[in-house]
Amino acid sequence: MEHKGFTLWFTGLACSGKTVLADAVAEDLKKRGMKVERLDGDIVRESLTSDLGFSEEDRNENIKRVTFVAKLLSRNGVAVLASFISPYNKIRAYSRNEIDDYILVYVKCPIKVCEQRDVKGMYAKARAGEIKNFTGIDHPFEEPNHADIIVETDKQSVEESKQIILNALEKMGYLL
């Protein structure tokens, strides 16, 4: 039996655990024989959206392009795991409207914990004014109005958060 495609969209602050968690879920889905594609903010910005900056307009254009790719893949039976800060409710609503099987995962984590996890020192640079428009420091992050799944990575291990997501996907009928 063919698996149905879907897009699992991970939103949250930088260093909240989006990429680590999406990678862990992706590995589990692959073991189940599913076609899986990872779309990650850092990687996509190197190729598909390298012409964009971090203004609100550019951030929205970034998400629109990724939404288009995710829509194409998921409607062709691929489980797409997209990890993007995607800080605005309006653009997340756009993605939900465009992608038929869209599941929003809010990777919730306090900014203090995100800063402690920041091995690249981005938060410190943003606080020092060296990085402008940094989400959570001098650029807003709107908590999702409608998250389908919420994991709290400051309170749960990667394994626990992954299991919450897999259980939800099973209840929603995406896992056989």
Image (cartoon, rainbow, N blue to C red):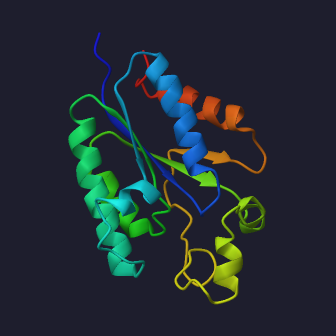
Q: Position of residue 69 (x, y in %)?
A: 25, 49
Q: Is residue 171 visible?
A: no
In which quadrant of the rendered view does residue 156 lie? top right
* Lateral position of residue 98 relative to residue 170, left or right: left
* Lateral position of residue 135 relative to residue 8, left or right: right
Front-most of residues 27 and 80: 27
Q: Position of residue 78 (x, y in %)?
A: 30, 31
Q: Image point 61% across, 87% down: which residue? A: 130
* Lateral position of residue 95 relative to residue 110, left or right: left
Q: Is residue 134 visible?
A: yes
Q: Image point 57% across, 34% down: which residue? A: 24
Front-most of residues 116 and 71: 116
Classify 92 as above or below 123. Answer: above
Q: Image point 57% across, 83% down: which residue? A: 131
Classify 138 as above or below 148. Answer: below
Residue that lies at the very extreme toward the bottom in this rendered image:
129
The N terminus is located in which quarter?
top left
Q: Position of residue 123 (x, y in %)?
A: 67, 74
